[in-house]
Structure formats: structure tokens, C-alpha cells
Amino acid sequence: MPCSFSERDGVEFRFDLISRDTATRARLGRITTPHGDIQTPAFMAVGTQAAVKTLTPEEVKESGAEIILANTYHLYLRPGHELIRDMGGLHGFMNWDGPILTDSGGFQVFSHSALRKIRDDGVTFQSHIDGSSRHITPELAVEIQEALGADIIMAFDECTPYPVTREYARESMELTLRWAKRCKIRKTRPDQALFGIIQGGMFPDLRKECAERLVEIGFDGYAMGGLSVGETKPMMYEMVEAAEPFMPEDQPRYLMGVGKPEDLIEGVIRGIDLFDCVMPTRNARNGFLFTRHGRLVIKNSVHHNEGGPVDPECGCYTCRHYSRAYLRHLFMAGEILALRLNTIHNLYFYLSLMERIRESIREKRLEAFRHEFYDADHLQKSG
């Protein structure tokens, strides 16, 4: 069931729905972009500043990543979108030849700057770098992303905070919808896919309404924004369930900024195709490592003389070459190599988890995989 987005040099943006899980809403698919394919469900490695922290693009690819997410807000402030455009766009600038998604910068504008003013025209805010006053409109957000040259770009939205009143959530949703229309009108590059973002706070009927109205405007894919902002997990899952039935079957669905391992599985079960989160890389830099049997805290003294790998079932470079004892030594000594090796492992864990999820959908056994995941006690064990 293909959906064409646009074409460049004969390569068509499209989403192919390959198969479904019979017991859940999970889908197996493939997104085709001018810079390569993305097997879905997929986790996007976060490269906020046009780099996945501590890793080279080659190492990111070797970990299994097919797509990188870069941050429009940060790259707009430094080094600037014009410079990146002149350096061949993000692909040339960072030497990454695979697909790239850029967010619109909305979340960062609303989370990084306390001194901001929201108007129908856009948002005025203070740069966290030099304190200068900046003004971003929906049109400028698209202009920046076109200069960055990502394969998938996002409409500018207001990331509705939590908690808020129903009145605020509706006003915020209406603003997001007006901005979404302006983003679609401003978009000029046919080789980029534009996704709309569903807001509505923690009100299921507003999420449903926002999804329906975005579909009326018409986008190349749809994202769920404003989640993982302090609400409970059941509430987050309820919002996904409220909007998912109203997102087109033949277009990709993206759950923004949500990425604990259990959230990936629960999101896939609810019909989500794309995820991103800083958790694997940030946790790695803080010495928290993911394994198939729970989270491991590498600085804990129990690991000081352990000769085995972080996870005996893991095939990453770190686990194939280094012991827990060595990784603990590096981390306690403040060696940069510790952060690199930890990041390689955590990113590989996430990407291999997604491969296992895809395989379970292919074999029509996702529910069984979900039970195996929880039975392995991922959420409770910590060593």
C-alpha cells in the first residue's frame, strides 16, 4: 500500500505497508527517501548538533542506524542554517549519506527559553547561547529546514505543556493547526516530506480532533507531539490510542521524544512506526547501560573485577571487545573512551531491540515477544 510523497532524481518518497501483526495494531513497513530506506518500526538516533554525541557517522551506521534526527533550533542558533546549506546541507556537512529527519524547533523554543512570547505570527524567544532575541514563524521554521536539507521535516507547533486546562489545550491545538497550514503553504522543496504534529494536551477528544483536521490539511506523515512531558504512562498510551485510528493507514506515524525500551514496544503495539529519544546516548554518558535483563550501572563496585561483557547476548563492538571491569575503570577514571564505548553499546541495544520487534511482527508473535521482554525483568533489575 504505497503512498507517494515527492520525487528527486527518480527516487520517490513513499511508505510501503508490508504486513501487520494479527493481534495488535503493529505494522511492518518501509519508508523510501532520496537518501535510502528506513525499515519500520524504527528508532532514530538523535544527533542534536548534527552529531550523535561521542560517535562518528560511521560508528552510528555500524550500530544499525538507518536514520538520524537533527535539531532545527540548535542548528539555527549555531552554526546557522545558511552556513549548513552552503556546505551541502546536513548530509554534506556531517558526512552522513542516509536519511535525516529534522524537528521544527518548537519543543526547544518552548522548553529552553523562559523568556518567550507566543503570538499568532510566531514565537519570540531569547537564545540560550548569547541571550539575543529571536523570532521564529512557521514560515521561517520551514525555510530553516529546507536549508538544512533533511529528508523529512516537521511542521512548527506549540508543544502543549503539562498540566494545562482544557481551554489552554484547545487554544494551543488551534494555534498548532493554523501554523501547520502555513508550513504546508510555505514548503517549496519537492524532495522533502513534511509531517504534521498532533497536539491536544491530555484530552483524548482534542487529540482525535487535531488528527482529523491535520489529515484534512494533508501531510506526508503524522507525529504525536506533547507527550513524555510529565504525564503518567497510562495517560501517554491513552493519547496515542485516541489519535492513532484517525491517522492514515498508508502514511507513517511518529511518536516524538518517547523512547524508554518498554515505550518502544508499547508504541509499536499501538500502531507507531517511528521513535526518537536521547535516552540511550544520555544514559550511556551517565554510566547507565541497557541489557536484555535490565539496566546496568557500570560504576557500581560489583563490576570492578567482572571479566564478562556488559551483555553476553549483545553483538555490539563494546561487548565483543571489552569487559565490565575495563568499562568501569574507564568510567571511574573519567576517560572519554568510556562514554564512546557506552554509547556504542546503548545505541546498538536500541537498534537491535527494534530489529527484534520487526522480526516478531514478521512472525506474527509480537504479543509473545512483549511478554518475554517483561518476563526478563527489564524494568526492575539493576546491577
Image (cartoon, rainbow, N blue to C red):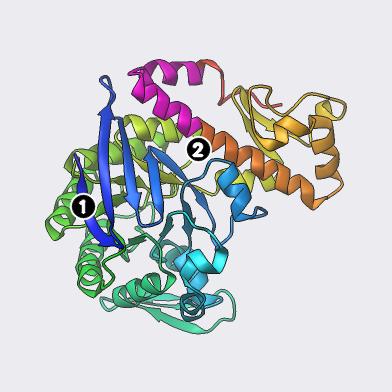
Task: Measure the alpha-carbon separation of dots 2 and 1.
Answer: 31 Å
Residue 367 magenta: yes
Q: Quadrant of the C terminus?
A: top right
Amino acid of disc 2: Lys
Amino acid of disc 1: Ser
Residue lying at 51% horizontally and 67% vertically, measured from the top left: 92
Vertical comparison of 143 with 152: above or below = below
- Specify the segment rendered in magenta: 353-374
Residue 170 magenta: no
Mark 2 element type: loop
Residue 27, by quadrant, is top left
Vertical comparison of 270 with 221: above or below = above
Mark 1 element type: strand
Which residue is labeled 1 in the image? 4
Of mark 2 and mark 1, the one earlier in the sequence is: 1
Residue lying at 29% horizontally and 76% vertically, measured from the top left: 139
